Amino acid sequence: MIEFLRGRLVEAMPGKAVLEIGGIGIALQMPPVDDDLPGLSGQEITLYTHLLIKDDVINIYGFRSGEERKLFNLILSVSGFGPRLALSLLGVLTVSQLYVAVLEENIPQLTRAHGVGRKAAQRLVLEIKEKLPKVISTEDLAACPVSQTGSTVFDDLTDALCALGYSNSESAAAVSKVIEHHKDLSREDLLKLALKNMTKS
């Protein structure tokens, strides 16, 4: 299996990225929305990969983090879920949001993804709810990138803390505090600081 690809990003559009590696352009299918990726055009980046060969067609799927790829692989294990639905879910929900939605059996949240109906969402929860904490640990979740499409810094960080077992109210309060006093920090650093403050209390 190809664990990851590192090369110069030459093209980025919704659902697709092209990396140049050794003079060869390699196309990767990706979650349909990633606001950060086009801004990295021309830079050398690393994408975690999943190689799928079906009917003599080779597809390489790319992900910004190892945790995102773990979720993709787990979703593929669910009956009726192929790469298209898995990418659709990862296109509208961050790793933390998807984690929380499954554990809390939040069907309306899961059905935000194009092509995922209520019955499919219920099946997804049924089949991966028990597996999810074993596949992605709380340490993995705290370390994974939280920046993704459309959601605000506040929402991302609050969802991440909720996924680690804290209530929504205490998570929101902790996030508000660190954002207010540390506006210049990255999302990852803000999450680590909020988590550190909550473990002290």
Image: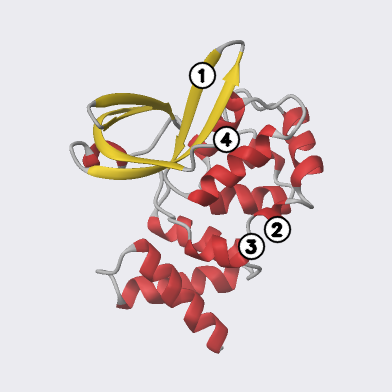
- Residue 84 occupies which quadrant of the picture? top right
Helix, strand or loop for disc 1? strand
> What residue type is disc 1 on?
Ile
Q: Is residue 168 visible?
A: no
Residue 142 placed where, x, y %? 52, 65
Camera-side residue: 122 or 127? 127
Label 2 or label 1, whichever lies nearer to me, is 1
Lower position in the chain sequence, tag 4 or tag 1? 1
Residue 150 placed where, x, y %? 40, 42
Using the image, determine if residue 46 lies above or below residue 85. below
Q: Residues within 10 Å of mark 1 (few under 14, many from 20)?
A: few
Q: Which residue is mark 1?
A: 58
> What residue type is disc 4 on?
Leu
> What residue type is disc 3 on?
Ser
Pointers 2 and 3 in contact (CB under 8 A)?
yes
Label 1 or label 3, whichever lies nearer to me, is 1
> What residue type is disc 2 on?
Pro
Q: Residue furthest bottom?
A: 200
Q: Which residue is mark 3?
A: 137
Instruction: Name the disc covering residue 197, or none.
Output: none
Instruction: Name the disc covering residue 133, or none.
Output: 2
